Image (cartoon, rainbow, N blue to C red):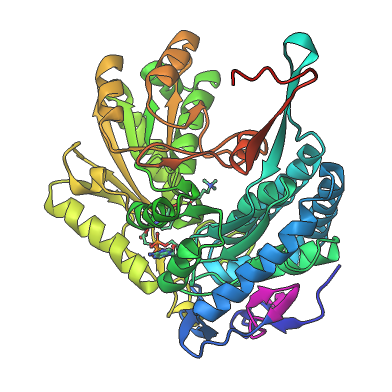
Amino acid sequence: MVSGDWWTNPHLDNNECVCVEVTDPSQPLNYVDGQRVDPKCTQTFDLREPATGKSLRYVASSNEEDVDRAVRSARREFKAWKKFSGFERGNVLKKAANIIRMRSEELARTEVLDTGKPIYEARMDIAGCADTVDYYGGMAAGISGEFLQLSNGNFNYTIREPLGVVGGIGAWNYPFQMATWKSSPALACGNTFVFKPSPLTPLTAVMLGEIYKEAGLPDGCYNVIQGEGDTGQLLGNHPDVNKMTFTGSVPTGSKVMEACAKGIKHVGLELGGKSPCIIFNDSNLDNAVSGTGIHDSLLDNAVSGAMMANFFTQGQVCSNGTRVFVQNSIMGPFLAKLVERTKNMKIGNPNHEDTKVGATISEEQAKKVLTYVDIAKKEGASVLCGGERVVPEDSLSGGYYMSPCILVNCEDHMTVVKDEIFGSVMSVLGFDTEPEVISRANDTEFGLAAGVFTNDLKRAHRVASELEAGSLYVNNYNVYPVGVPFGGYKKSGLGRENGPEALDLFTQVKSVYVEMGDVEAPF
Ligand SMILES: NC(=O)C1=CN([C@@H]2O[C@H](COP(=O)(O)OP(=O)(O)OC[C@H]3O[C@@H](n4cnc5c(N)ncnc54)[C@H](O)[C@@H]3O)[C@@H](O)[C@H]2O)C=CC1
Ligand SMILES: C[N+](C)(C)CCCC(=O)O
C-alpha cells in the first residue's frame, strides 16, 4: 500500500542517481481525529535534514488549544475503544503491522531523511516496529483478569482495565520505534493515545496514524501533536491525560515525572545510560593471534559486540555500552582488531546501501560530541581513531558527519567516562579481575544495559546477576528482539517497554467482590 503523496528527495538525486521516494514532508504534521491537520499556533521551528544540513521545512508548534484538541479527541474515542474486545483490538494492530511491512521502504527512507541514520539500519528498525505492533496485536486477546473463590460461594474477580488517555513523548534517535513501542501496547489494552515526537524528527509518527486508520483504528484513538519542550509540558500537565510515557534525557524525564506527580498520573521513563560492556580474556588471544580459527572467532565476536555497543545510529543510542572494559592481558590484540574494523566503516550518504555511518542528528549534537572528544584529550585520554568532522562528498558538505572514535588511556573519573555523550565515542578501560570490573561497572548513576563477553558459562551468569542494569547481554550487545522487556535500573528509567510487562503498565486492576449470601452487618 502506498500513500497518496510522494515526494522525491532532490538532495540525493546526484551522481549516483539515488532518487528515493518518501512521504511528502510538506504536508500537515499534526494528526488529530484521523486526519493530518495544521495546528492553530503560528509559531514554527526549522526542520533540517541531517544528511545535508538543509532546511526541509518549518514545522508549526502545537499550543494549548492544539494539545487540548488532540486530548479531547482521544478522550471522546476512549469510551468506544475500551469496549472493543481484546481480540478485535488485536486484529486492528495485526493489520497495521502488515501495512507497515508493505510500506517499509517508504517508512525507512523517510526515517533516513529525518534522522540521518544509514538505510540498512532504518530498514532493520522498521521491520522490528512491524513485529512489535504484531506482537501486541497477538497479545491483546489474552489480556484478562483473575478469579478468586471465597468462602460460602462468595467470590472475587478482577478486570484489567485501560488507564484512559496516554500521552507519549519521544526522542529523535528511533522516531518510528518510539511511536510504535509506546502506542501499540497502549492501544492493545484499550487506551487511546496522543504522541509528541521530537521536534527534530516529526515525519514518521504521522504516517503511523494513517497506517492505523487504514487498518481500522477508529479516528481519535491515535493522535500526533508536533512541538518542542513547551508542547511536551502542556501534554504532561493536561488534566485529562492519565499516563505519560517518555523517552529522552534524564533532566527532561525528571520534569515529566514532576508533572505526573502533581496530577498523580502513571509514568513510564526510558532515560539515558552509560552502560558497561565487559570483555574477559577467555576470548583467548594467544591462540587467536596464532590463527587457530575457533579462537579468532571468539575475539571477533567481542570486537563485533563492542562495535554494536557503540556505533549504531551514530552512537545515539541510550543502551550503548560506551564504557568498554577489556581485561588487560588481551588489550593489545583486541584494540588492533577493533581499530582496523572501525576504520573500515564507510561514512557517507545515509541513503547508500554500503554506508555504515550516517549523519549525526544536528549541528548542535555533532558539536557537543566533538567537544567531549576535546575534553577527553585534555583530561589525558588518547584518540586511537576517529573523533573528527568528516565531509563524505561535496553535496553533503552541510551534513553533520563525524568519524567513530575510540579512546584509550581512559580512567573512571574522566568526564567522557562518566557522562552520557550520545555520539560515537567509545571509552576503552583496562581491568585485571572480575570483582574489580563488577564494582567499576556498577559505579554509575545509570543502569540501562550491560554486556559481558566470556566463554566461561558460570562467569557469564555470575557477572550478569551482579551487574545493576535492566538489559543484560551475554556474548552480544544491542539486540532487542520483540517480546523482550527493555528499560532501566537507577536513573535510567521506570517501567519497561516491549514484552508482556508493558501490558501491566498500560492497565489498572479493578477488583469486584460478589456476595452470594446475606449481609452480616455488625450494626
Ligand atoms: N537516553 C535517551 O534515550 C536520549 C537521551 N538524549 C540526551 O538528551 C540530550 C538532549 O536531547 P533532546 O532531544 O533535547 O532530549 P530531551 O530529553 O530534552 O527531549 C526529549 C523529548 O522531550 C521533549 N521535551 C523537552 N522538554 C520537555 C518538558 N519540559 N516537558 C515535556 N517534554 C519535553 C522534547 O521536545 C523531546 O520530544 C542529548 O544530547 C542526549 O544526551 C536524547 C535523546 C534520547
Ligand atoms: C531500543 N533501542 C535501544 C533501540 C532504543 C531505545 C531508546 C533510545 O535509545 O533512546
In the figure, residue 322 lies in which quadrant? top left
Picture coordinates of residue 27, whole percent (x, y)? 67, 84
Q: Is residue 16 above or below residue 103?
A: below
Q: Quadrant of the C terminus?
A: top right
Picture coordinates of residue 461, whole percent (x, y)? 47, 15
Q: Quadrant of the N terminus?
A: bottom right
Report the image quarter containing ligand 1: bottom left
**Left or right of residue 384: residue 304:** right
Picture coordinates of residue 448, whole percent (x, y)? 42, 38
Q: Is residue 319 magenta?
A: no
Highlighted range, magenta:
18-36
Q: Going by the picture, which residue comes out furthest to the front?
A: 523
Name the residue rendered at 79%, 33% in the picture: 142
Q: Going by the picture, which residue comes out furthest to the bottom?
A: 42
In this view, the residue in front, 275 or 87, is 87
Name the residue rendered at 81%, 43% in the picture: 86
Q: Is residue 56 visible?
A: no
Q: Is residue 497 above or below residue 154?
A: below
In the figure, residue 275 lies in which quadrant? top left
